[in-house]
Image (tube, grey):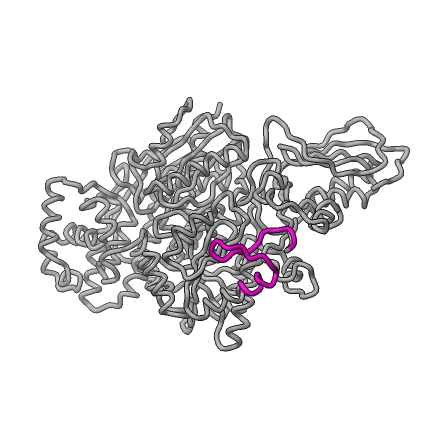
Amino acid sequence: MTVDRPTDSQRQQFQIQGIVQGVGFRPFVYRLALQFGLVGFVYNDNHGVTIEVEGTASALASFHTALITQMPPLARIDSITVHPVPLSGESAFTIVHSQNGDSPNTLISPDVATCDDCLRELLDPTDRRYRYPFINCTNCGPRFTIVLDTPYDRDKTTMRMFPMCPQCAAEYVDPLNRRFHAQPNACPVCGPRLERGEQPVLTDIDALDLCAFTADQLVRGEIVAIKGLGGFHLACDALNADAVAELRRRKHREAKPFALMVPDLATARQLCEVSDAEADLLQSRRRPIVLLRQRPETPVAAGVAPRYTTLGLMLPYTPLHTLLLHDLTHLHGDQQPVCLVMTSGNLSDEPIVYRNADAAERLRPITSNLLLHNRDIHTRCDDSVARIVAGGVQMVRRSRGYVPEPISLKNPLSSPILAVGGQLKNTFCLGKERQAFLSHHIGDLENLETLTAFTEGVAHMQRLFDIQPAVVAYDLHPDYLSTKHALALDLPRKIGVQHHHAHIASVMAEHGLTEPVIGIAADGTGYGTDGAIWGGEVLVADLRGFDRAAHLAYVPLPGGEQAIRQPWRMAAVYLQRSFGDDFLTLPIPFVQRMNADRWRVLSQMIARGLNSPPTSSLGRLFDAVAALIGLRDEVVYEGQAAIELEALAAPVDQVYPFAITDSAPMIIDVLPTIRAIVQDLQQGCSTAAISGQFHRTIAALIVALCERVRARSGLRAVALSGGLFQNKTLVEQLLPLLEAAEFQPYLNRLVPPNDGGLSLGQLAIAAALTAP
């Protein structure tokens, strides 16, 4: 581009940090320079993007404004530094090759769902990329999962194995083309190919046939492994009860719900109730799984989400998904909605499979077919899960579509920090300056495969963002694999962080809170400073420390971990505490079906203090109530009893009795609640009403606790975190009560309230403790 040089020219340098690589930012700058008659250059570097532009003062001012107000849809500017530089006298504006520096500080975009322009080309028979399963541009497609290193250029991605054909190369170098420097740019001539099993599909016709062939398999009730952006899915027809049951059997996943994929919003609305906010979330470029209330007449097989009132739905986010669902729609016609189970491609408790060779070995026993491709995935990345709660987005799992976009911190870190998270739903977090990079979902650190995924992920993100930690933060639980990993690191400072303090700090970090708050931390398990198992905690906390203002009264956890798997044990404990040993004569179904001999063995263990640690866990109280009213005596996954208790709850305004002592810390006595529930059971009250009144009681209890703490401290800000605040019924009852009592409640919005957000809180606390 050549322009005439004005006589009153000035020259400015712009240094831009944020998500500005791989998102069409340089061609955007090129077009702005052309629009405002400017000369100079733009290039990527390890800090972001550097621009020098020369022209009139008014043109430079307009250029600056347009940079901020008209940026590409995937771009995010975190900072712009502008300063004058000497005139250079070029006659053109150019895009120059990326410049490598010594200290990378660039950001990488998350993987993004297929854009509307690419979708139109994908389904246009006249387009050269018609039905090409890897179509993409600067506005969509793989990013984080294919990047090897920075700067984000093709030779530093897994696309380096695919030299571009002349047509793709021409698009790649044309600043006015939307595929300018789109690193995954490809077409059927030069790009990745579909494969069936380990045999490549060599022609376009074969690729067309393979999608149709796979769709036909799914219609016939078979199970297929499909390679996506961040790993494999296991797919089957969600309306076929036999196929769903067989997938559960082969995957060894007894009851946990399966995620579903539907072709469009209209189909989602056939299956579930979808609000405008939920529709926006479903259709967003991030494309998470969205938890939605299912319609009573939904045709989805009951085995997809046993005992749930919700379904987890997502829309297609790759071209291959779009083609597959398009072909399924053609096969189904108007007879029934198209809906696929799309669950993580793994056996239960293992990380998602993302390499072709591993899929052939580990998924072959589960599937009828492997629909593969030869574009490597460098970093595994599960689907994100979200829902709309109390008018805003709540993350349940933050991964694909969100990672590695950083969370901005209020204050800069004095040194780089690694926070290793917890044991369940693990994520880690790396921080430098004002940025916290929360990792993709790692999973439960309970086997070598998941620990390997954790260590590989830490190493990759350290390299990607040039973070060499000087500090590591970890959970106090001595048996967590993440804690053992942290303590084995050769770092100058190691900071143990109490589990529930980290939960509250995660909310504070999100919202930029630095003054003390009332922290309500409610979950199943967290190692306390006294060695007990905490989980029903009221803290007065800032980022440097906390006081334990109140907690649920301790009860024994008979059998330790076994009491978590068998909620009947907690129900028996609470009954024994409420009624003494005479509870065995109570005329209620729970007691009548309970094995009295098993309880006598457990009661002797408790009396002798054998493997019965004290716990203040609110999660275990939810388990106890679920077992007490006959919902579930044993669980097969974490949180199952509490989730089913919420699903049962009917709207109720009444509150069960409870008591709070005036001691320090205050002790929460819920034995009156248990006695009242038993009375309702004896009087034949419905379990739905009991569940509803129990939820209302917990909401009222939390408000009462906050009022007690405010009377002592004057605090009004309330931070709510921990796995129990995934309970939509509880949260949507609690927030209006807190606001009516003139509190200011804060929830996790950017990270999950469960242990998936723990590492952000650990990092925030470590940052405060190491601040100068």
User: How far across and down, in percent of the image, does residue 439 sit?
Assistant: 47, 41
Q: Position of residue 620 (x, y in %)?
A: 26, 50
Residue 652 horizontal side relative to residue 35, left or right:
left
Whether residue 23 can be seen here:
no
Q: Quadrant of residue 615?
A: top left
**Foreground residue among 160 and 499:** 160
Closest to the observer, 142 or 17: 142
Q: Residue at x 51, y 43 (%)?
A: 378
The correct choice, above or below, for 284 with respect to 445 in the image is below
Quadrant containing the N terminus in the rendered view: top right
Please name whichever residue, 133 or 715, is drawn nearer the observer in this view of the structure: 133
Residue at position x 43%, y 67% from top?
A: 237
Q: In the image, 90: left or right of 611?
A: right
Q: How many marks?
A: 0
**Is residue 447 magenta-colored?**
no
Q: Position of residue 651 (x, y in %)?
A: 36, 64
At which x and y percent is residue 92? Answer: 83, 38
| Quadrant assignment, res 535 | top left
The segment highlighted magenta reads: 189-211
The residue at the far right in this view is 7
The residue positioned 53% from the left and 53% from the top of the image is: 373
